[in-house]
Image (cartoon, rainbow, N blue to C red):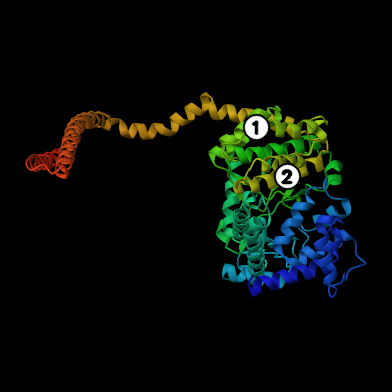
Amino acid sequence: MTPGELRRLYLIVRVVLSYGLDELIPRMRLTLPLRFGRRLLFWMPNRHHDKQLGVRLRLAMQELGPVWIKFGQMMSTRRDLFPPQIADELALLQDRVPPFDGRQARRHIEAALGGPLEKWFDEFDEKALASASIAQVHTARMKENGKEVVLKVIRPDILPVIKADMRLMNRLAGWLPRLLPDGRRLRPLEVVREYEKTLLDELNLLREAANAIQLRRNFEGSNRLYVPEVYSDYCRETVLVMERIYGIPVSDVPALEAQGTNMKLLAERGVQVFFTQVFRDSFFHADMHPGNIFVSYEHPADPLYIGIDCGIVGSLNKEDKRYLAENFIAFFNRDYRRVAELHVDSGWVPPDTNVEDFEFAIRTVCEPIFEKPLADISFGNVLLNLFNTARRFNMEVQPQLVLLQKTLLYVEGLGRQLYPQLDLWTTAKPFLEEWLRDQVGLPAMIRAFKQKAPFWTEKLPELPDLVFESLQRHRQLHHSVEKLSAEMREHRVRSGQSRYLFGIGATLLLSGTLLLLGQEEVYPAWLMAAGIVTWIVGWQRSGK
């Protein structure tokens, strides 16, 4: 490890121990080295005995920086996996991270725009409206049209912290295949690099602006999701100007219930929005934690989501989309044979995998789960159990699916928070079935024809020439094949003759040698000369 990596590792260990997070290490034989190592680091005591575990965990993540805050945000969405005192504290990491100074934010924005804020905006509020791991937002009003906007600005000096954490993660990921038997199949380096790319992309607000414009266009006129307007003329790499929205944070369940929101429909629409983004658009918001999702005040009986912070988006290619959709359908139908076959066909497990054994292993995991009411089944737990099963069959982690799985866990956690009886199966299955029919049925054929029609129309006048050239090439190819066949036949004949003459020549030479050894005076020389002549003729017939 480099000195920089060692310094960062030491800092992480010091922060973790100073907040007493070693309490989270389970007391079991496997963790004995960790607990022994903690005793050796006696000069790093817990300095926050007076605070609850959830508070200490949140403060430690805030101190360690964006990478850790992101992890805390993900944990906060799964209230079914963590006790309330931890989940409530981690929820503050979504948009209540301590902001940096508003005057510094003003200076940064003015430097990016190239002039004083008063030139374009009125009523700029130096107090941050919300603050997260990467950036914070301030409110203002545009001079040209009087519209309320928010100005998002990147936190200063966070890039070195992110790069330090990513270098350390890359180092540890490189060790993992050597330390763990299944380390190679986890593909840690690819996963870390994918995560690093995602984080660095989030630092470029021009990319976020483009993502938001794309998502807004995909859901234009939709009654499920609204994406605020982006004012791209005022956007820079470190500054984003977007329409200000008003809504209820999706995590504020009491406020949603107080205004009479249809919670069941709201939860179902969250699932529908996710699957629409993934399978219809192949462009999905991959940072759907509660801090980025609001619900409109209007029409509580017909609730509308409002999505912000589009810095992290994901996409899938056609093959992965199809295999994933078919996997979902087969899983919902409890067709474990099909699930196993799809894993083999997609290349997610080796082609020599025994499908029968794989099917039985999946069935063994899933059938006890399906004995519960569907509303009590956690899809996250199902995914984890399936991964552990597939790992025994040499399944490799698919880096392109990691972001999708994370987002799906976000969505399910959010849905269950809104409506605990949410049935992910019933909500998602009709959508996936319809999408698959659209992809492989008559609509898909018509769509493919429409896509290819301009190309065919362009090439149609050239068709007679292309046919004529093809026939000529076929005729030339046929002539060449016939010529080659004749040459091969001639070569075989000449080779047979040469082998025959070689045999005669060898026989004559051998006979002459034997007679010579028998002290004959005439015949040996003639026989040996005839053998040599025959051998020379055979060599010439061979074409050499």
The answer to whether any part of residue 212 appears in the image is yes
Q: Position of residue 247 (x, y in %)?
A: 76, 48
Residue at left 66%, top 61%? 172
Q: Which of the two discs, 1 and 2, labels the residue nearer the N terminus? A: 1
The answer to whether any part of residue 137 appears in the image is no
Between 120 and 77, the one lying in front of the other is 77
Name the residue that disc number 1 marks.
339
Between 239 and 191, the one lying in front of the other is 191
Q: Position of residue 466 (x, y in %)?
A: 26, 32
* Amino acid at pointer 2: Leu
Secondary structure of residue under mark 2: helix
Relative to 66, residue 184 above or below: above
Task: Assess disc 2: are there few (<14), some (14-19) or many (≥20) residues with their C-alpha within 10 Å of its C-alpha.
Answer: many
Q: CA distance from mark 1 to mark 2?
A: 20 Å
Between 351 and 95, the one lying in front of the other is 351
Residue at left 68%, top 62%? 134
Residue at left 77%, top 64%? 62
Label ID, residue 541: none
Between 400 and 226, the one lying in front of the other is 400
Name the residue that disc number 2 marks.
409
Secondary structure of residue under mark 1: helix
